[in-house]
């Protein structure tokens, strides 16, 4: 931990408290606020936390979402009659665009973000109300997400008799959705937010099997799709998963239907885990990967058991499904408590999302990747939706025929004039020096654009016809970082 993050009267992150209070004070003086947020799981939870805090503080607001906060989008925001704009989960990386509008008096920005701040034009001052962990010695890629920054702001925005600690659960969903968790769970300021959620009775932290679908998937599918740690004869093997479970001498069916992980007793879970570990060892799975089978998990205790909302990983995936199909409004409604119409719509989007991801992954495995010296890449054209090509790339790393020891670049058609490129690495590569945000930023600038998000996952939009130049520059930059 690189800064003091002990919970106290100074909020969950004392290092950020003074700036958070200043931001909150500015929001309180506003007649009304335009809340602008990114659309992924971290962005949606950031917006939901901010929306809940603004409503509780009785500050009128309107919410808008953007897939990308570029010059055009900022100009559109500036053209509204809102004098105060709260940016969540983006804004820092676009300060070079936002600050000139602020200097001209178009609006006063309040930014709660965790991404790398952009360099400002000469003669333009940084906005005063900028809440970002990177400004205070915390790592925005691993210690505090956008939802975490929004949560810190919400705690400063509490009315004297209020308490926004119940919003910690959404901040945990955002952090996990932003891939800030490791086998050991969340860390830094994120962990302090977990502790506040536990104290508020909305989060449960436990050591459990680190496999997606603990709440919702029948056991055979639960193990078959457990691709983070691949176990031969079980992973991606429907019959093998059923055979493995049938050999455990456990009653794993109820009413003729397979039970789910959440339905098992602790003793039953231990038996399954023991069997998995034995199979992994016998199959030659490396020790460090076997260790990754078990780790820290987070449960939202107010949500109904057996639903996607109970487990933070499944919740974040549900939110991503709404965002990738231009229905951020549905994701926000779910975050704010709509458990009827919005949740039904989100589940429909999730089913569609899973089908598209499965088809996309199958296409990548069939086609393979082109391997350069330091990166690998594939160009899906219009075969994979540009809003999910980055997720497919992350799923593909380490899958059959795709290397897991180098970053992957994924290209997809955005329009006739533009190509979306997404990069995915791993926390192991980051520890070796990989910073995909810098790679994307510099490689896209080499072809006349800009990009970059986090050091483990980043994206950019580049002109059609510049793919080869982009790959060459990215390959060179990754080589320098990992040298």
Image (cartoon, rainbow, N blue to C red):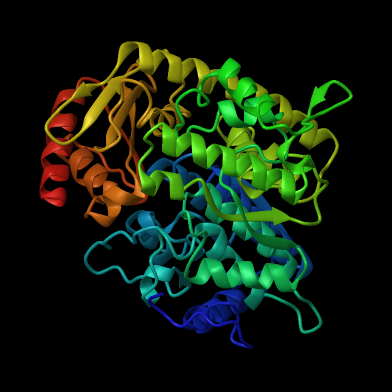
Q: Residue furthest right?
A: 255
Question: Which x, y percent locates residue 392?
Answer: 44, 27
* x 28%, y 29%: residue: 403
Tell me: 242 left or right of 472.
Answer: right
- Tell me if 241 is positioned left or right of 127 in this view: right
Residue 415: quadrant of the picture: top left
Q: Nearer the viewer, residue 244 or 443?
A: 244
Q: Is residue 325 visible?
A: no
Pick the front one: 50 or 355:
355
Name the residue: 47% across, 82% down: 15
Residue displayed at 10% across by 40% down = 476
Counting from the top left corner in percent of width and height, residue 319 is at: 63, 40
Residue 200: quadrant of the picture:
bottom right
Q: Quadrant of the N terminus?
A: bottom left
Instruction: Report which quarter residue 458 is drawn in.
Output: top left
Q: Position of residue 295 (x, y in %)?
A: 54, 54
């Amino acid at each position: 931990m690189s800064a003091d993050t002990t919970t106290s009267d100074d909020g969950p992150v004392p290092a950020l408290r003074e700036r958070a209070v200043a931001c909150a004070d500015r929001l309180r003086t506003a007649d009304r606020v335009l809340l602008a947020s990114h659309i992924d799981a971290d962005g949606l939870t950031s917006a939901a936390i901010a929306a809940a805090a603004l409503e509780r503080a009785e500050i009128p607001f309107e919410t808008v979402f953007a897939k990308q906060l570029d010059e055009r989008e900022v100009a559109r925001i500036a053209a509204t009659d809102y004098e105060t704009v709260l940016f969540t989960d983006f804004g820092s990386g676009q300060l070079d665009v936002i600050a000139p509008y602020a200097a001209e008096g178009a609006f006063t920005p309040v930014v709660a973000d965790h991404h790398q701040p952009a360099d400002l034009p000469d003669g333009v001052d940084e906005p005063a109300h900028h809440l970002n962990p990177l400004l205070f010695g915390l790592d925005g890629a691993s210690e505090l997400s956008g939802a975490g920054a929004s949560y810190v702001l919400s705690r400063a925005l509490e009315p004297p008799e209020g308490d926004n600690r119940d919003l910690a659960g959404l901040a945990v969903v955002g952090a996990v959705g932003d891939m800030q968790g490791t086998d050991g769970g969340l860390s830094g300021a994120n962990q302090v937010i977990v502790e506040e959620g536990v104290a508020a009775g909305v989060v449960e932290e436990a050591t459990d099997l680190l496999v997606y679908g603990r709440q919702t998937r029948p056991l055979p599918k639960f193990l078959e799709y457990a691709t983070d740690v691949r176990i031969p004869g079980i992973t991606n093997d429907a019959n093998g998963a059923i055979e493995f479970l049938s050999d455990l001498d456990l009653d794993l069916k109820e009413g003729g239907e397979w039970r789910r992980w959440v339905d098992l007793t602790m003793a039953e879970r231990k038996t399954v885990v023991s069997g998995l570990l034995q199979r992994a060892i016998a199959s030659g799975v490396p020790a460090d990967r076997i260790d990754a089978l078990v780790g820290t998990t987070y449960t939202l205790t107010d949500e109904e058991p057996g639903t996607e909302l109970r487990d933070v990983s499944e919740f974040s995936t549900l939110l991503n499904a709404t965002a990738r199909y231009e229905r951020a409004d549905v994701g926000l409604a779910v975050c704010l408590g709509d458990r009827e119409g919005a949740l039904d719509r989100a589940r429909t989007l999730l089913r569609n999302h899973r089908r598209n991801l499965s088809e996309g992954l199958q296409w990548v495995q069939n086609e393979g990747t082109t391997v350069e010296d330091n990166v690998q890449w594939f160009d899906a054209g219009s075969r994979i939706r540009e809003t999910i090509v980055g997720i497919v790339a992350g799923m593909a790393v380490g899958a059959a025929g795709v290397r897991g020891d180098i970053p992957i670049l994924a290209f997809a058609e955005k329009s006739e004039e533009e190509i979306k490129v997404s990069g995915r690495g791993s926390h192991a590569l980051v520890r070796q020096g990989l910073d995909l945000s810098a790679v994307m930023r510099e490689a896209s600038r080499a072809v006349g654009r800009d990009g970059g998000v986090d050091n483990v996952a980043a994206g950019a939009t580049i002109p059609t016809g510049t793919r080869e130049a982009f790959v060459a520059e990215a390959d060179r930059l990754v080589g320098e970082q990992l040298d």
